[in-house]
């Protein structure tokens, strides 16, 4: 929706100019000729930004600014001062003004200030809404974001509630793949059964085989007692195989047979044990490329990929960043025994601007760190890591920009590829198609860049 701007100035030529010009910049603009009239209108209608001149007949602009800040602190005020009147600008800021613009000004300068002020108000409203949700005892689950990219994930989880179909969850590290797996289990008919998780990339082949299928006494040197495997431990529930792409090929054969036959044979045992276990797998690798490179069995891929859920990276989830941040803030402030009520709009701006290469896991760590460091009841920008405080989005040089910003061709290529990858929600296969290169080439470039 277009932001509503209230312009206050007794100069009719100025107000007429702004009323005619700002709508073309995406703003709905209303003008009043005095501070008294502006305050009366603010009691009846809502505005996103107030723009006022300082020197007016009747109520001075500084007095109007003070009244607006006192009565409607949610509405940012931009004051217009005469050129060179630095003292007036300082007084306005002290009175609570969000920004100031000096006369004569270019309309582009005012539009930039309006954009920032309107965004500032939106962030304050969002932060306040999140605080209200927390204070009313309505915790925000990790998957309960409002972004469009998360709706298909929630829809699939709901549709799979009555199904035992195998699910493959893909996405970058830290996007919350295990959270989705646990949500699939807790909403399924198996929710009363166990949820057992194992990171397949964290164990060597022999140990992983023993973990999955179990072993009998004497099966190998250190097997001094029989061990029940995770397939049996998860009987009647769900077995979550994280980093499924890391399983060695020989073990993939045994896993495939277990999934097909619904029976497992522990190491060193001659008998088989029937299991009733639902399998959910996750990976941050492109298994189709692994199949092409003979590192992953195609038949196993089809067995585990009955239903596919793609987790979007955090940088594509918009205001979900603030939802998650508020949830983590509530969690860690309670653990630390600190009465922290939220974070400032400036923090919200920084959180939304950052690209989150570590995704939800990185955001979680950032909020835990902020709670540990803050000395106040509100998280401030100073409580964030330096890389987030100083982060600025990279961009490819556009026409008309300063030639001093020119970068090497390799850097232009890198920025464009990362931009396409972000637009595709981190889906590298789709990004490769858009870029007109094969997936191996894209993977090689990302590896070189350390992405």
Image: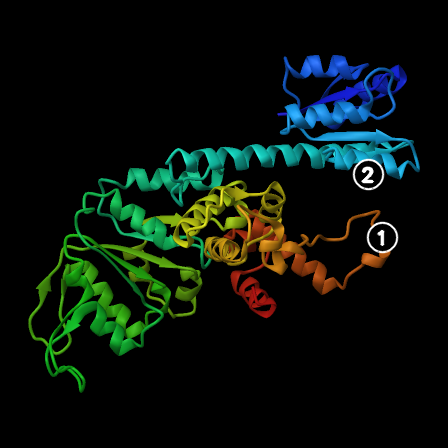
Residue 235: x and y, percent?
Answer: 15, 57
Res 386 → quadrant: bottom right
Front residue of 137 and 191:
137
Question: Between tags 2 and 1, which lies in front?
Answer: 2
Residue 236, above or below 268: above
Q: Is residue 152 left or right of residue 266?
A: right
Q: Is residue 8 left or right of residue 431?
A: right
Residue at image position (74%, 16%) is 38
Residue 28, above or below 109: above
Label 2 crowd (10 A; few <14 / some 14-19 / many >=20): few
Residue at image position (22%, 47%) is 164
Q: How many marks?
A: 2
Residue 63, above or below 148: above
Residue 32: x and y, percent?
Answer: 78, 14
Q: Is residue 437 left or right of residue 155?
A: right
**Helix, strand or loop for disc 1:** loop
Identify the image quadrant of the C terminus.
bottom right
Residue 270: x and y, percent?
Answer: 7, 75
Res 382 → quadrant: bottom right
Q: Residue furthest left?
A: 271
**Helix, strand or loop for disc 2:** helix
Label 1 crowd (10 A; few <14 / some 14-19 / many >=20): few
In space, the residues marked 2 and 1 are separated at their CA atoms by 31 Å
Front residue of 133 and 287:
133
Identify the residue position indicated by label 2 in the image: 90
Colouring convention used in this rendered image of the protein: rainbow
Earlier along the polypeptide chain: callout 2 or callout 1?
A: 2
Identify the residue position indicated by label 1 in the image: 402
Res 293 → quadrant: bottom left
């Amino acid at each position: 929706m277009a932001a509503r701007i209230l312009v206050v100035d007794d100069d009719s030529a100025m107000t007429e100019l702004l009323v005619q010009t700002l709508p073309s910049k995406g703003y709905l603009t209303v003008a009043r000729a005095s501070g008294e009239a502006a305050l009366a209108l603010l009691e009846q209608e809502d505005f996103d930004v107030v723009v006022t001149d300082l020197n007016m007949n009747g109520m001075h602009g500084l007095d109007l600014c003070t009244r607006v800040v006192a009565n409607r602190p949610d509405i940012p005020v931009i004051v217009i001062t005469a050129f060179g009147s630095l003292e007036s600008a300082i007084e306005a800021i002290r009175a609570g003004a969000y920004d100031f613009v000096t006369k004569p000004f270019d309309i582009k300068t005012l539009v930039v200030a309006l954009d920032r002020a309107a965004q500032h108000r939106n962030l304050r409203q969002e932060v306040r809404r999140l605080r209200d949700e927390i204070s009313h005892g309505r915790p925000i689950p990790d998957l309960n974001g409002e972004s469009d990219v998360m709706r298909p994930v929630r829809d699939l989880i709901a549709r799979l509630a009555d199904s035992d179909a195998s699910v493959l969850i893909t996405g970058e590290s830290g996007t919350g793949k295990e959270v989705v797996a646990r949500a699939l289990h807790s909403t399924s008919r198996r929710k009363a059964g166990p949820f057992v998780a194992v990171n397949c990339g964290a164990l060597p082949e022999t140990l992983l085989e023993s973990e999955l299928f179990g072993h009998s006494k004497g099966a190998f040197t250190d097997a001094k007692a029989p061990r029940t495997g995770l397939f049996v431990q998860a009987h009647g529930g769900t077995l979550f195989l994280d980093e499924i792409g890391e399983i060695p090929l020989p073990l993939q054969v045994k896993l495939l047979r277990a999934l097909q036959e619904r029976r497992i044979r522990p190491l060193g045992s001659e008998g088989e044990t029937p299991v009733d276990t639902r399998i959910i797998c996750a990976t941050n690798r492109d298994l189709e490329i692994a199949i092409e490179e003979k590192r992953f069995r195609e038949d196993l891929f089809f067995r585990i990929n009955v239903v596919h859920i793609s987790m979007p990276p955090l940088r594509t989830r918009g205001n979900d960043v603030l939802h998650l941040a508020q949830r983590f803030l509530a969690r860690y402030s309670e653990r630390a025994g600190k009465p922290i009520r939220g974070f400032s709009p400036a923090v919200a701006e920084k959180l939304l601007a950052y690209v989150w290469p570590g995704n939800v896991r990185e955001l979680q760590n950032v909020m835990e760190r902020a709670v540990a460091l803050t000395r106040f009841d509100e998280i401030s920008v100073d409580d964030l890591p330096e890389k987030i405080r100083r982060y600025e989005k990279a961009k490819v040089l556009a026409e008309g920009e300063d030639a001093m910003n020119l970068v090497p061709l390799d850097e232009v290529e890198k920025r464009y590829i990362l931009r396409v990858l972000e637009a595709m929600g981190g889906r590298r296969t789709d990004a490769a198609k858009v870029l007109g290169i094969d997936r191996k080439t894209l993977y090689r470039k990302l590896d070189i860049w350390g992405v």
